[in-house]
Amino acid sequence: MSFTPVKLAVLVASVREGRFGPVVARWFVDQVDRHGEFEVDLIDLADAELPLALPATSPRLDPDPVRPDGMRDLTARLDAADAFVVVTPDYNRSYPAALKTAIDWHFTQWDAKAIGFVGYSGASGGLLAIEHLRQIFTELNAHTVRDYVSFPRYYLLFDENGELREPAEPAAAASAMLDQLLWWSRALSAARATPALS
């Protein structure tokens, strides 16, 4: 039986000046390409308009609010995705504010979809951010896969060209996470096609 590729959106969560996120994201997209079962869309949140002021009505009550023109492309790409991988650092023991804003401006885009994580930071490797994000995406009825990729002290692991000095272990972690993401994405896609019980 042949399957169509799963549409995977890879989100670069950090928008700060001098960020390292795009380097990690490019590495991960290479791993996705090697895996061969996904159609990848690399989304950089720095390219989207993300106002901190949210709509007056909760997205649970109005899941498609009027959004800024500069967010329309992001919304369409999140809609189109079957699954997500969030590439995130730790900021003050949590995740970047831009990512929370992008999450809060959307609702149905995350619903019943699979989500994986690639973390990087000085000490924890992004795990503090990932743990917070698991709670948030659970509230949005998304499924976060168990496996993840983590880069503690990332500045020692990547060389000046953005290449990993010792790539075997991170590549194996990425492959394992993508296997889980693929299974859950296909299962949830089939489930979304079945009418929910009222």
Image (tube, rainbow, N blue to C red):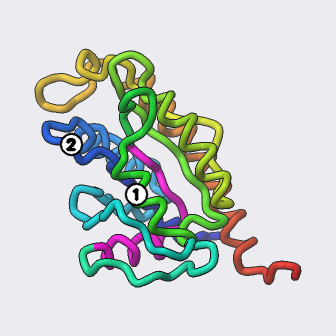
Examine the rendered structure and indicate whether residue 47 appears above or below residue 168: below
Q: Which residue is mark 2?
A: 16
Q: Which residue is mark 1?
A: 101
Residue 43: quadrant of the picture: bottom left
Span highlighted in magenta in the image? 71-87
Query: Hey, what amino acid is under mark 1?
Result: Thr
- Identity of the residue furthest to the front in this view: 56
Examine the rendered structure and indicate whether residue 158 appears above or below residue 26: above
Counting from the top left corner in percent of width and height, residue 189 is at 66, 70
Of the image marks 2 and 1, the number of the one nearer the N terminus: 2
* Left or right of residue 73: residue 34: right
The foreground one among 34 and 51 is 51
Magenta stretch: includes residue 172: no
Residue at 44% in and 48% down: 86
The foreground one among 39 and 141 is 141
Query: Hey, what amino acid is under mark 2?
Result: Arg
Residue at 24% in and 75% down: 70
Measure the alpha-carbon separation of dots 2 and 1: 14 Å
Counting from the top left corner in percent of width and height, residue 89 is at 36, 34
Mark 2 Cα within 10 Å, few/some/many (few <14, many 20+)? few
Examine the rendered structure and indicate whether residue 65 appears above or below residue 22: below
Residue 140: quadrant of the picture: bottom right
* Left or right of residue 45: residue 85: right
Counting from the top left corner in percent of width and height, residue 68 is at 30, 78
